[in-house]
Image (cartoon, helix red, strand yellow):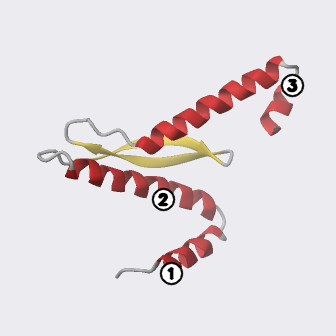
């Protein structure tokens, strides 16, 4: 069964209204994007195949996101979305350090 963009959007909106719904949607979207990216990667690399998943974590909206990272047979697939998330985490750590050195307390830095 194929859904239209409007139907998918409506279902996502309804799920987001549930407790922890937005958090769940972020995890689902990350996994879905990585699986689609692996599909494109494998289509460009004949002879290579998908080989399960490995656990992954990141942070989003102040909470820990847990998701599965797709793998390929030869270990050559590295999702680009993870590089973006890693860059954001490093930038947040750098910013927190700068704010702390400028005299903000740890509590002020956390809530900044």
Which mark is in front, 2 or 1?
Answer: 1
Residue 28's disc number: 2
Q: Residue 4 location in percent, x, y?
A: 45, 80
Mark 3 residue element: loop
Which residue is found at the position 51% from the left and 47% from the top? 66
Q: Residue 40 location in percent, x, y?
A: 28, 53
Q: Residue 37 location in percent, x, y?
A: 35, 51
Q: Nearer the viewer, residue 55 or 109?
A: 109
Which mark is in front, 3 or 1?
Answer: 1
Gap between marks 3 and 1, in whole Å? Answer: 46 Å
Local packing at callout 3 (Cα closer than 10 Å; few below 14, some 14-19, many 20+) is few
Is label 2 in contact with label 1 (beta carbons under 8 Å)? no
Most distant residue in the front direction: 44
Which residue is found at the position 20% from the left and 41% from the top? 73
Q: Is residue 70 above or below residue 9?
A: above
Is label 3 in contact with label 1 (beta carbons under 8 Å)? no
Gap between marks 2 and 3, in whole Å? Answer: 35 Å
Mark 1 residue element: helix
Q: Which residue is mark 3?
A: 105
| Relative to 44, 83 lies left or right | right
Q: Which residue is mark 1?
A: 7
Q: Nearer the viewer, residue 102 or 11?
A: 102
Which residue is found at the position 60% from the left and 29% from the top? 90
Question: Which label's residue is closer to the chain start, 2 or 1?
Answer: 1
């Amino acid at each position: 069964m194929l859904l239209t963009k409007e139907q998918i959007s409506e279902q996502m909106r309804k799920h987001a209204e549930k407790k922890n719904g937005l958090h769940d949607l972020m995890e689902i979207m990350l996994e879905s994007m990585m699986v689609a990216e692996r599909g494109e990667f494998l289509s460009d690399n004949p002879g290579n195949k998908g080989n399960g998943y490995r656990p992954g974590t990141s942070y989003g909206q102040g909470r820990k996101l847990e998701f599965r990272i797709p793998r390929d047979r030869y270990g050559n697939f590295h999702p680009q979305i993870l590089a973006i998330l890693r860059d954001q985490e490093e930038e947040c750590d750098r910013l927190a350090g700068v704010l702390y050195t400028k005299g903000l307390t740890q509590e002020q830095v956390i809530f900044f």
